Amino acid sequence: MSAVKTEDSASGVSVVNSGGPVYEDKEENDNARPEDLSELLAAGTKLVHEQAENTQFVKDFLHGKIRKELFKLGAVALYYTYSAMEEEIEKNKDHPHFAPLYFPNELHRQEALARDLEYFYGEDWQSQISCSPATQRYIERIHEIGREDPVLLVAHAYTRYMGDLSGGQVLKKVAQRALKLPPTGEGVFFYQFDSIHSNKAFKQLYRSRMNELELDANTKDSLVQEAVRAFQFNMEVFKELEEMGKTIQEDVLDGGPIHGHMEGDVSKCPYYAAKMAASGGSAYVYQMAAAVLRNPTGQVLLAAWIAALAGLVAWYLK
């Protein structure tokens, strides 16, 4: 559930990774070459990335419209996906085309997802979950390439981990607000990378390591195709969750859309309300009126306004 892309730049601070390498935040490489793997992956997945961002599931998530049961099922899908990917990464950690990208302490998510599932389902969470058909197809592909062509694991690791460190951080805040999750991280441990002290610096390190892999043009092309395929697998999971959502009888927990760094209810921002009224027309006005009528204070104010209007009409008709 990290199909949201955010651009980043860096700015000059040395960071020591816990028990790992030293990496630096510095200016983006202005000398990036079109043939660099990171550039090829970014360009080659641009279209499918946009398609993933525009699935209904992701759009609803970004607007804070989250069903708790659906969020839990999404976490289940992620648990099976990362379990498969990290199993194959462990098996191939010494492969010359993957070893430079092996950062288990910094990146691996299986344990964090297990903690999230225990929070949502209780201590017996493992007996309550199962792998969905779309997720099963995804993990079967991961196991297949782990056995037959391990270099392609780079595409899946890039697609998942870089997305988690970018747009995933936005989704974490939305989920915490919408689901009223504890600020201590329960339910969203998946999005917390405690051993990474600068996401920007680490992503730059990861990209530079990818670019240093000795790969021929055909292998790079295969990696781009596999990354596109990874996005497609994710979209299949999103669509499956959308279908599951149609059968879940539960009120949508609306955390409001992302609106800068404003805390609390975004509807309290007068600029946002005016903008939505202008762009949404009568539908938004109706929604606002309905919200006012649900509020006791709003009802009193409306009654007072109607009384004043009635008095004005009576005076006019004398």
Image: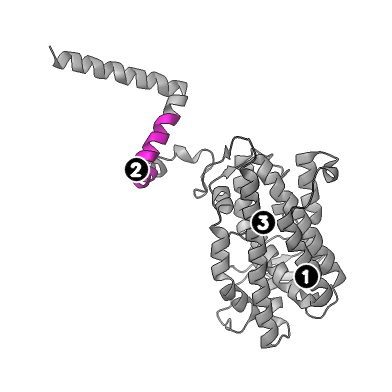
- Furthest-bottom residue in this view: 216
Q: Earlier in the sequence, mark 2 or mark 3?
A: 3
In which quadrant is the C terminus drawn? top left
Q: Quadrant of the N terminus?
A: bottom right
Does 169 appear above or below 298? below
Query: Which residue is at a point 58% across and 81% down the rendered structure image?
Result: 32
What span is colored magenta in the figure? Answer: 274-291
Give the side of residue 100 with respect to residue 64, left or right.
Answer: right
Q: Is residue 37 above or below residue 269?
A: below
Task: Name which residue type carries label 3.
Answer: Val
65 and 167: which one is in front?
A: 65
- In the depicted structure, whether residue 317 falls above or below residue 117: above
Q: In this figure, which residue is indicated by the disc labeled 2?
A: 281
The residue identified by callout 1 is 21
Q: Nearer the viewer, residue 183 or 315?
A: 315
Q: Rounded to the nearest whole Å, what is the CA distance between mark 2 and mark 3?
A: 34 Å
